[in-house]
Amino acid sequence: MQLISENRAFGGRHCRYRHAAETTNCEMTFAVYLPPFASKENPVPVLYWLSGLTCTDENFMQKAGAMKMAAELGMAIVAPDTSPRGEGVADDDNQAYDMGLGAGFYVNATQAPWSSHYQMYDYITKELPALVEANLPVTGEKAISGHSMGGHGALVIGLRNPEQYVSVSAFSPISNPSDCPWGKKALGGYLGNDESAWSEYDASVLLAQKQHYIPLLVEQGRADQFLEEQLKPQALINAAQKSDTQLTLNMHEGYDHSYFFITSFIDEHLQFHASHLGLS
Amino acid sequence: MQLISENRAFGGRHCRYRHAAETTNCEMTFAVYLPPFASKENPVPVLYWLSGLTCTDENFMQKAGAMKMAAELGMAIVAPDTSPRGEGVADDDNQAYDMGLGAGFYVNATQAPWSSHYQMYDYITKELPALVEANLPVTGEKAISGHSMGGHGALVIGLRNPEQYVSVSAFSPISNPSDCPWGKKALGGYLGNDESAWSEYDASVLLAQKQHYIPLLVEQGRADQFLEEQLKPQALINAAQKSDTQLTLNMHEGYDHSYFFITSFIDEHLQFHASHLGLS
């Protein structure tokens, strides 16, 4: 694990690391914010943040304005990249923004040419936390959140691994990828056309299957340009009602899909996760 | 004044505008954050933020994390571009980052090929505030701040126009441009080799000339990679002592030149300006 850069921020540290990843079979980059006083003797819990289409490990750390509250709460934040990258990693033939590089969708791909590197589900749920917990001053306590494609990833990962994450939240998630253009393209490409393979990566399908007990918080702007065609939060609401699962989904008048929306409500999400991580 | 984009943030609005500017003889772009409830009936004071080399109107709004506190305080923030741009606007022959586009240094250029467009001092002190005050729900009350090249701009503009700005602050400013490589190149290029013309654009020279009464606050990181060669905060301290001017200059262990530093202390600067703008 190689340190690429380090910046002091709010008395803590923002660090970027590069490492050879087995799951994705390439070098991966991630960013971490460590709050003040985090140390081997005083390890802190971690919020994993999954970013949206076209992002890298950098967007959230630079634009969300989350570090002040993370410093106050004593919470680390880990922001991984959104896909494998580098020589030999397949990209969309037309370099589309919604497939391939920057668009891993947090799945384990089964189809060529993706399957040799696009194993983001295993990277996020297994390899990255093991690496972080072995090398940084953190506990094993984890929560997970994300935006758009990353909101989809966070919901799927949280719902499937409630023993591993204490809480899950999302901003503007792709709520029902089996039933929207972004999701159909990505799940079809990575998992093949047999839609039965898609359900384990669809938050609305997972949520409807059984009652879930992991705390769930979702934020959505009503002026989001992707609301109707791609995001479909009503599918989450319907699924939660069907399985009698408790879901808090806040709709916000006037807010769009951008980081201006995320930054406006990120503090509430950090406080939500902190309450389940025993920090407040 | 043409609206380019608008995003809701913290209950207020982040807007980008384009307009034909007389001073710089080209189209200029600026961003503004308007806090909640700002209206013709309830106009708010304005903090002008001048950005550093290579920046546009976007960097501060996306990276500083300033909007939450501005919303709480009821303060607008205006972030102009760092130079004229567009067809026919001269750039450095080698497209250097520290001269020409993105590097206007907030001066009125007198030398060819710069003088026809690089009139950033007049743009910032006259044309932009007149436009903002005529078209947006703001009062005439103003404060000014900035980073690096923009910290230089803010200090120079505040010291020369204390009747126009109630307070001035800077992060990591180019404190004595007559005596550092960035400043010598830019002032020499824009104003010519006669160094007597440089003094009205050098905060340390201005500060030493006479006692100033405008409230001054400066933040500087000790791990800033440009500290010794380019920024030279000691020149400001020496100048303030010479003129018996009150200056608060805070040095911070471990902090560098990046937005990770700015975001760590921006709230204190907003509060400082708010206290002089009658907001707290």
Image: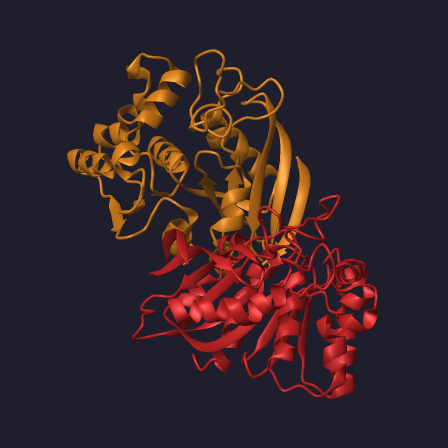
Chain colours: A orange, B red
Q: Quadrant of residue B41?
A: bottom left
Instruction: Provide residue A15's location: percent of width, then percent of height.
Output: 62, 46
Instruction: Provide residue A190's location: percent of width, then percent of height.
Output: 42, 18
Residue at 54% x, 26% y: name it. Answer: A84
* Picture layout, residue B206 above or below residue A158: below
* Picture layout, residue B148 above or below residue A126: below
Residue at 55% x, 65% y: name it. Answer: B49
**Quadrant the C terminus of chain B occupies:** bottom left
- Apparent side of residue A204 relative to residue B176 in the rendered image (left or right): left
Instruction: Provide residue A140's location: percent of width, then percent of height.
Output: 49, 41
- Which of A241/B134 is in front? B134
- Which of A163/A256 is in front? A256
Instruction: Provide residue A264's location: percent of width, then percent of height.
Output: 39, 55
**Quadrant the N terminus of chain B occupies:** bottom left
- Apparent side of residue B31 relative to residue B105 in the rendered image (left or right): left
- Which of A179/B26 is in front? B26
